[in-house]
Each structure stands twice: as structure tokens, then as C-alpha cells.
Image (tube, coloured by chain):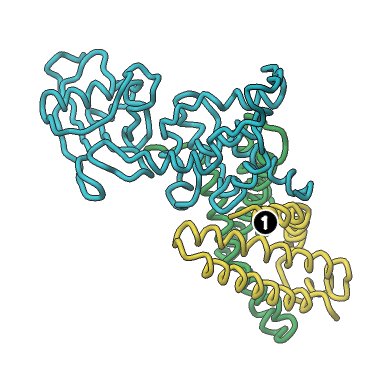
Chain colours: A yellow, B cyan, C green
Amino acid sequence: MDLRLYIAQRLSAIVMIPLVFGHIGVMIYAIQGGLSADEILSRTQGSIFWFLFYGLFVVAVSVHGAIGLRTIISEVLKLREIFLDLIMWSFGLVSIFLGARAVSAVTWI
Amino acid sequence: MATETDKMIVKVWRGEKNSGAYETFSVPKKENQTVLDVVTWIQQNLDPNLSYRFACRVGMCGSCAMMVNNTPRWTCRTHVKKVLRGDMLEIAPLRNLPPIKDLVVDMDPFFDKWVAAGGHHAPSASRYDQMPQIQSTEPERAEANKAIECINCAVCYAACDTVTHNENYLGPAALQRAWTLVNDQKVKDRGAILDTISAKGGCHNCHSQGSCTLHCPNGLDPMRSIAGLKAESIKRSLKGN
Amino acid sequence: MMKGYRNHPLWYAYLLHRVSGLVLVLFLPFHFYVLSLALTKPDKLNGFLHWTEIPVVKFAEFGLVFLLAVHLLGGLRLLVLELLPWSANQKAMAAVATAGAFLISGTFLLNAV
């Protein structure tokens, strides 16, 4: 972990502070009375706010998680730098892709 | 009540380089006894081949540092009564450093990292220049003073799991040293030190486990120093250096 | 009981932070996949959400909320440690983070059952 990765990780963490509080709040609200697709989608579809909220969340968590994963793998498996970078970028990009699909599935009409 | 004939079971790591095993000795308990006393007694009475380091034996030099029941300690400052588990004691060489023989480890990697972190003081002035008048109460000097009493015993280095899992990691002692220099007006290029400790094995690898601060026999706080380095490195990068 | 140099509160706080992060990051792709079913297979999503009725799943959700909350609050402690002027009460902050996480995830659980 060098300065640049560290800054990216801490920055993405700071961005996510309000997002995680918000997400947990939403979950506590949503879980009441059980979950259903219709209920969820009726709240989120067509909403610019949720699109931006979860869109930002997806990017931040993908960066944060990829770097965190890299750190754990480097300490446990001791792979070479190039493999660590490969795993980090792969995970990050796949996460952004899957997350973008999830956000669009839930917020686009 | 302990009598002269009461014994305890002491397991001591024996071996050379990377191979070895625990050997068990029966050692008499005494009223006042340190772990260093125990090791010395074994070497003098049972096995003259036992290798170990010590020097001052009064808690000033740090030479006698070893793992006692898997905790790094100065053995001359560790009373047996405080660490005895039932009747058992386990003594091993310091973690995270290459073993040489028995309880002796190679301290070279520890000192190499001390130097690599910028431990060598490169002054900003010569003897012909005016000496800066620094008060001990100035904030930077106060910070540095909290960290300069390190005697390089490597207890913190042995306690740190990040050192264990990351061979490039400079370690708490070396980084704490860098922190004292970063806070020292008399150092020529403090920016260069920040760059050094922001590189691959630098301060950003620290996970703030706090084992270093907990086990430092001198009561220093490397975790705090490393947190200071992290903050300074960010300030430096924001200034665009 | 772990003996030795690791057996202290801040080390356990580190372990909890690492384990929670790891579980969450491995859960994430699965989470994204399930949500994206709303796009391609809305019936499958509904079917999947049916599973969330059973107690074991509710408890697992509680576990995830706990891990997320403890990772967030523990992370806040680290950001304070690293960016703000030093304060010596690290153990107290770690305790508050863990307690807060139980409070938050407990609220979730009670609303889920």
C-alpha cells in the first residue's frame, strides 16, 4: 500500500460515510413488513435521487473494496505486485459493471 | 509458599537458523526471579550451550528482549511470578527476525529498515552556522520528544503482525524514528523523509493494531507516531509536492 | 483464549474490521447480481425475495447489517485516528463502534421480525 492507494481508499471511505448511514436507514425502513420487488421498485424506479445515490455508492465501494481486497491478498498470499494489481483492477471493474447494472435495474424506468 | 526445592517447567526454543524445537528444563523457583535469571540459571547449571543475549540486566539496554509466553518482553524486567502459567514458562527468540541460534536473532533487518526509513540524521546546517533555538515546548519538538527515547530493542517490531505479513514494511520503530526527524527543524530535507515513508513499505501499511504501543517497554507510542506520519504525508501531497 | 502479543482489544478491533470488510466485499457481487434481476427477470427477483421471509435468512441479513455498521463505525475511528489531532482513548472508541453496530443492527433485526 503506497500513498496513492491509501488516499483513494480513505477518500472513498469518506464519500461513503453518509451513503452507508443512508443505506442502513433505508434497509431498516424497507424491511418492515417484508421485502417484495414491487414495493422496492415503486420507491426507486424513475428516481434521479436514488440513481445518483446508489450510482455514487457503487463507484466508491468498488474502489474501496478492490483496494481492501488487494491489501488482504498481499498480506495473506504474498503474490507479486503485478498479480495484485490484476486482481484489484479486475475486481474493481467487475464490481462497477455489476453495480451499474443493479442501479439501472432498480432506478431506470 | 515457594521453597528452594519448588520447581517450574521452562520450555526454551533451541535450534539453529530455521530448524529447532522446544527443550524442557526443570528450574528452581525463587522468591525474586526474572526470566533473564531463569535463562542464565539454565545456561550456568544445565546447558552451557544455550545461546542468548543480555547486557545491562537492569532494563536500560534492551538487549535481552525475547518472546515470553508468546509476548515480546525485556526478560530482565519480567518477573517470573507475573508470567508463570501454573508452573510453566515458555521462552523463544523474538518474532519477525531471522533466528541465529537458540534465543539469539539477527538484528540486521531491523537496523537496515531503521536506516532505510531515513534514520540517519542529515543536518540542515554546519557547525559554523547559528544553531536554531528550539524550545522543548514547541509543538513539533514536543511531538518529537515523545518518540526519541527508542533504544532499538525490537520488541515493537516483534509484536507487529503487519511486519510478519509484509516483508517490505519498515516497522514501528523505524517509522517512529522517521516521525522524530520529520518534526526536527535541524533536519535538512524533511520532505524527502516523508517521501521515503510514503513509498511501498511505508507508514500507510500500518493497520493500527496497536501491539507496538502496548508492548513498548519504554512506554513509547509508535502507533501515534505512524498516524502522525500518515497525516503529514497527506498534507504534503495536498500541497502538491 | 488467544495468548500472547495479539490478545488485546485493539488487535481484535483490527480483526473485526478486516473480517467484516472481507465478508462484505465478497457478498457485494452477489448482492449486485440479485438486484439486477429486476431488469432481466423480475419474477426471479420476487422468488428470491421470498427467501428473505425465513428466519435463518433474516438472521443472516442482521449479520450483514452488523458487519456493515461495525466496518463503518470502526472505519470512522480509524479516520479520526489518522486525520484528526491525536486522542488517547482508542479502546473506548473501539468499544463505542462495536456497541453502535449492535444498536443499529439490533434495530434492523427487530424491524425485520
**Res C9 visible:** no
Callout count: 1
Residue B159 lies, with reference to residue B241, above or below; the image says above
Q: Nearer the viewer, residue A66 or A86?
A: A86
The C terminus of chain A - image quarter: bottom right
- Chain ID for label 1? A
Q: Nearer the viewer, residue A2 or A74?
A: A2
Residue A2, position as x, y percentages in the image: 61, 54
**Residue bearing mark 1:** A4
Is residue C2 shown left or right of residue B135? Answer: left
Residue B138, position as x, y percentages in the image: 72, 21
**Res A80 visible:** yes
Q: Residue furthest front?
A: B128
Tag 1: amino acid: Arg
Residue C62, position as x, y percentages in the image: 61, 57
Using the rendered view, name the quadrant where residue A88 is placed. Answer: bottom right
**Number of residues whose C-alpha sits closer than 10 Å to that of mark 1, classed few (under 14), some (14–19) or many (20 or more):** few
Residue B234 lies, with reference to residue C65, above or below; the image says above
Residue at screen point 67% across, 32% down: C86
Residue at screen point 69% across, 50% down: C107
SS class, disc 1: helix
Q: Nearer the viewer, residue B98 or B68?
A: B98
The N terminus of chain A - image quarter: bottom right
Is residue A99 shown left or right of residue C64? Answer: right
